[in-house]
Each structure stands twice: as structure tokens, then as C-alpha cells.
Image (cartoon, rainbow, N blue to C red):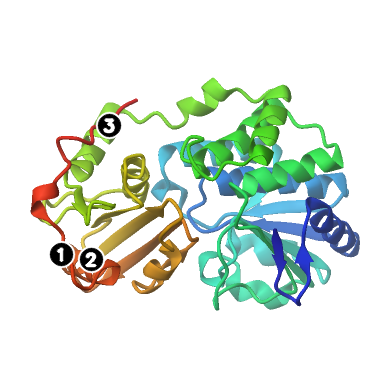
Amino acid sequence: MYIFLGGNKKMENTGELKLTLDNLMVESDAVFIVPHNRPDYDALGACVGMSLIAGKHKRNNYIVINDNLNELPVEIKKLIDEIGVKHNIIRLGDLSSYLTDNSLMVCVDVNKNYLISTSDYLDSFKNVVVIDHHKTDEYTIKTPNIFVDTCVSSTCEEIARLLFMYRIKITPDQANYLLAGIVLDTNRLTKNLTSKTFSVLSELTSRGANPEAVNNLFVEEFEHERVMQKLVDSTKFFTYSIGIAADTNDSGIIYSIEDIAKCSDYILRYKVDASFAIAYIDQDTISISARSKGNIDISQIMKMFGGGGSPTSGAARVKGTTIKCIVDELTHILNPTATLSNENSVGKVLKLTK
């Protein structure tokens, strides 16, 4: 169910979102589509879908990406290059050249002002719309047009439903982008699934989406797997219902954010209620990735470390401490009277599988 934060009205179907977009795009000269920083498949797929919707309204539209592309995962950089062939991608520094007095900004797969590159430009837009599936909080973008459905699998699922409602023709590549977003946020179709999700999956397949091609996007190379396996091998059970993977031995390995996130995803496949993966992403910064099957509110825990997320998925970045201190604090938050057992190491049990 949508929550409309501008008042007490609750949005109960995609039609309400469509009506809002129809009205605001009519008033706009240009549409700027903004994903979260370090966009993933869900964010990029949603950007493509929203670009098609803006095109349906015959509005100039631009996808704003300000990350250093060389710092993004190779597969994401490649996807951005592919999208840029048929859709306008601009950098933040060029934004002012395209802005008009009647510009509309649509944020997709994000609702926090500190997670978008355009936060300093919010007052430059006549209207702002937010479409997301992550939990809102005090940092949520201030606009009356916020559509957040925490029950939907992904932003791509919601955008796909909009495209079907508009009867917009999509290419097989565009269907693949949307499918990839759903596959990512459902951990390869293993969580957050509803009958509506499967309906969207079926429709995308009928429009040319290739599940095998999309699955290949998620296949790690051997070295990539080997590094991630080291983090998986460090996993220990906490009170037998929570898995914590942490490189507390100070191995010196610098992990990617994606590896840490995949590690927490992987641990959640086992009989645990929640999983946490903790490792260095540079010499000074520790990243925490957290997942839950629903019994533990991840967003509340990640807030305590300066991060955020949804009830089932979240992350944080911490400086000025050690991984061991984070693990000690985390175990205290989860259960003040318990400690992490060294006897429950599952490194020999959890092995990566294709």
C-alpha cells in the first residue's frame, strides 16, 4: 500500500501514482530522473522505465548520474553505457544547463535526501515525485508527492506495472533491465515475492525479457567468488538465529560494497532470521550490510550505526572504530545478555554455490 506523506491519504493502487504523474508532467517542460548514489539494477531499471513514461508524455527527460563511473562495478558501468545509447544521461555538473522554471524531478528507488546527488537542487524544481519501496524516516525528501510501498518487491516491479498501465511498448533489452531490478531485490527470486510480482515477471517475459541473460548478470567470476568466500568463511551464528560475517582477523583485504551485500544475502539463505556482513571498503571505512526475513527491523539497527534501509534490508558505513568493536556493539543491540559464540563458526558449512 502506498503512503502519501504529504497528508493522510493512502494510495491503494498504481492508478493513483499514474494520475499524479499525468498531472505533473503536463505542467512540466523537462523531467529529471534521479536514482540513488551508486545505482544498482533496481535503480537503473526504474530510471529506464520512468524515461519511457516521460517520453510517452512527450517531455524531454534526463537520467542524472553523478558517480565516478570508474568506481562503479564493471557490470553497472556497462549497463549505464548501454542505457545511454537510447536514453539521455547527464552529469550533475550539467544539470543547470537543462533546468527550466517548470522542471519535474522524479526520484526512483530512493527517498532519502542524503542518498541523491541532486539534494542541493531540490528548490530548483517546480515539483518533486518520489517512488520507492524503502522505509521512510526523518531524512525522507520533503515533498507532497511521495509514493512508498514497502510491500512491493522492488521499484522496478512498480515501474513495470506503470508501463503496462500506460500500454507503453518496451524492447527486450528494456524488459531485461526491469527484470534485473526485480531479480536483484528479491535475492534471485527468493524473498519479498507476491502474486503481483509473478504477474509482472510473466508480463516482462512475454515482452521479451530473457531470464537466462539476466541471470548471467549475477554470475561472479572465480576471483570475485574467492574473495567473497573469505568473508563468508568468517560467519558465526549468534544465538543460533543470526549470522554475522566479519573480518575481525584484520586480514587487510579491502572488499567491495557489492561483495559485502552479497555476503549478507548469501547467509540469509540459511536458517537464520537475520544476517550481517562487516568488512573494510577502504583503509578507513567499514561497511555493514544487513538482511532480515522480517522478524527483525534492519532499518532501526542500521540507524544506530548512522545508516538506514528498509525493515528487511539496510546498510551503514562507519569510520573511527574497528570491526571487532562493531561486532561487539551489534551483538549487544541484538541481545544485551549474549555474546557471539566462536564455537558456531559456519565457515565449513556455508560454501558458495552457483
Q: Residue at x 16, y 40 (%)?
A: 347
Do the CB atoms of the residues marked 2 and 1 lie less than 8 Å apart? yes
Q: Is residue 232 left or right of residue 160?
A: left
Query: Is 180 located above or below residue 304 in the figure?
Result: above
Q: In the rendered structure, which amino acid carries the disc numbered 2?
A: Thr
Provide the residue designation for mark 3: 352
Instruction: Determine the image quadrant of residue 320.
Output: bottom left
Q: Nearer the viewer, residue 66 or 41?
A: 41
Residue type at tag 3: Leu
- Say whether residue 267 is left or right of residue 212: left
**Disc nearest the viewer among 2 and 3:** 2
Residue 244 image point, x, y percent: 24, 53
Tell me if 288 is positioned left or right of 159 in this view. Answer: left
Measured along the vertical axis of the image, is residue 178 above or below residue 14? above
SS state under label 1: loop
Q: Is residue 88 in sight in this rendering? A: no
Look at the numbered disc 2 and give the secondary structure of its residue.
helix
- Tell me the residue at 31%/49% (across/down): 260
Q: Which image quarter holds the N terminus?
A: bottom right
Query: Can you tell which of label 1 and label 3 is closer to the viewer?
Result: 1
Q: CA distance from mark 2 to mark 1?
A: 6 Å
How much space separates mark 1 and mark 3, taking CA atoms?
A: 27 Å
- Judge by depth and name the residue closer to the eye, 86 or 160: 160
Identified by mark 1, the residue type is Thr
| Secondary structure type for disc 3 | loop
Say which residue label 2 marks: 331
N-term-proximal mark, 2 vs 3: 2
* Residue drawn at (77%, 62%) of the image: 11
Q: Quadrant of residue 172?
A: top right
Return the residue at label 1.
339
